[in-house]
């Protein structure tokens, strides 16, 4: 079997598919690693349907290739069955998300990228387990709270009943006009107090809203070209690809601490997964651009499929932020006339870069910083990725850029 780019994905177990999980072994540059890869139910069901009728004494290898089938209105990939009699290629329908992961694996250039991919898979699985555990705790607490509330209500009703009975039996209490007047006065006082409290609450709420707005008043640079590599002199744009991720919020917090701009280029498949993180970035005033849905190379796609990738992602982002997406960064920076003309039709601008510290390959925060510190930053667009090393290097990078007297801007 031909191994694309020295990479091979072997399916180790069919049974795991029932839980929408691929138990696979990936081989890359003579290194192998086994892991469980959570996929979407649509792809899982399609793959299970193809493999259920197959012999158990076979090996299965997942292809890294996929194509768009106009008749099925879906992506199609293949799995190759290998046994003593030979091999057979079986086709199955798959989702944009699955194709995006395949393209990421196919585009890997180093073993360190494989480790990053495996780390992200592990982190995603851990996050999903934590979410499930938190939901169970919330459900348990909710049930417990309902029980306690019911007990309190019953107790209060009993108490009120006893008090009323005592008043009637022992004091022969009647409501006089004086009682009513006093009661009305007391209620009026309570109403006034509640209104005062409400006014204070509303005032505090307005202050909070104003403070949040101030965080969005960040320096910005307007991009005027269809394809952009630079910003004006004495400005710098720091940009982050491949989110949203578990690192996004921390990046925003660092940018906010230094009161500098930043722009995030998000993948549609992760926007679907982490909409709350997209909201977080938008609410804190940072720019959000489109980085495609599945991270496919647009050089290999037809204009129709390019539009599908871009529009799908725009719709996902805009549904969350209620703002039109105008910036696009092609995966791998792969751009040509076909790509840029198609993006122009969408009334968007292509954002590339002139400085790449290669943080996708470097795992040392200090080394990433040195890559930046050895450049002249004025007028540059820096390409970063959402990794732990980049998060660790970011404060030092911002301090260096501040020392160079350049303004770090949002892109518009």
Image: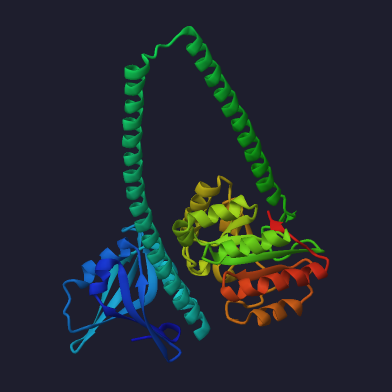
Residue 240 in the figure: left or right of residue 84: right
Q: Which residue ends up furthest to the front in the rendered image?
A: 170
Which one is in front, 287 or 157? 157
Position of residue 190 relative to residue 45, above or below, is above
Task: Give the image location of residue 268, x and y in percent.
Answer: 48, 59
The image quarter containing residue 197 is: top right
Residue at 45% across / 57% down in the picture? 272
Q: Which residue ends up furthest to the top in the rendered image?
A: 177
Quadrant into which the N terminus falls: bottom left
Residue at 26% across / 72% down in the picture? 16
The image quarter containing residue 207 is: top right
The way the protein has been coloured in the rendering is rainbow
Which one is in front, 67 or 110? 110
Task: Give the image location of residue 106, x and y in percent.
Answer: 45, 77
Residue 264 in the figure: left or right of residue 91: right
Q: Is residue 339 visible?
A: no
Which one is in front, 22 or 91? 22
């Amino acid at each position: 079997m031909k191994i694309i780019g020295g990479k091979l994905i072997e399916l180790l177990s069919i049974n795991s598919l029932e839980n929408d999980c691929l138990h696979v072994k990936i081989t890359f540059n003579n290194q192998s690693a086994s892991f469980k890869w959570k996929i979407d139910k649509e792809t899982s069901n399609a793959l299970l349907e193809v493999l259920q009728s197959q012999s158990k004494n076979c090996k299965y290898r997942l292809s890294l290739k996929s194509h768009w089938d106009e008749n099925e209105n879906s992506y199609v990939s293949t799995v190759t069955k290998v046994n003593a009699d030979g091999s057979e290629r079986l086709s199955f329908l798959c989702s944009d998300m699955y194709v995006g992961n395949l393209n990421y694996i196919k585009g890997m250039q180093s073993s360190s990228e494989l480790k990053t991919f495996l780390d992200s898979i592990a982190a995603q699985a851990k996050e999903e387990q934590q979410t499930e555990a938190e939901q169970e705790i919330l459900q348990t607490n909710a049930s417990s709270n309902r029980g306690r509330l019911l007990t309190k209500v019953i107790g209060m009703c009993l108490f009120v009943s006893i008090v009323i009975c005592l008043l009637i039996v022992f004091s022969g209490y009647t409501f006089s006009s004086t009682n009513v007047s006093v009661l009305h006065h007391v209620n009026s006082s309570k109403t006034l107090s509640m209104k005062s409290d409400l006014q204070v609450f509303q005032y505090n709420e307005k202050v909070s809203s104003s403070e949040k707005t101030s965080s969005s008043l960040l320096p910005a640079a307007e991009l005027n070209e269809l394809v952009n590599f630079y910003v004006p002199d004495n400005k710098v744009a720091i940009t982050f690809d491949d989110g949203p991720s578990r690192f996004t919020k921390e990046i925003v917090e660092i940018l906010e601490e230094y009161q500098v701009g930043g722009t995030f280029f998000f993948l549609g498949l992760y926007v679907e997964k982490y909409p709350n993180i997209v909201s977080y970035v938008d609410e804190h005033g940072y720019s959000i651009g489109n980085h495609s849905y599945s991270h496919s190379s647009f050089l290999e796609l037809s204009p129709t499929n390019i539009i599908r990738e871009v529009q799908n992602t725009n719709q996902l982002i805009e549904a969350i932020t209620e703002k039109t997406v105008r910036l696009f960064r092609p995966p791998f920076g792969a751009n040509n006339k076909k790509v840029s003309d198609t993006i122009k039709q969408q009334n968007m601008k292509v954002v590339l870069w002139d400085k790449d510290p290669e943080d996708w390959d470097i795992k040392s925060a200090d080394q990433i910083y040195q890559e930046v510190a050895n450049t002249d930053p004025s007028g540059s667009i820096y390409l970063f990725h959402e990794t732990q090393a980049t998060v660790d290097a970011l404060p030092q990078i911002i301090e260096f850029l501040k020392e160079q007297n350049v303004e770090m801007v949002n892109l518009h």
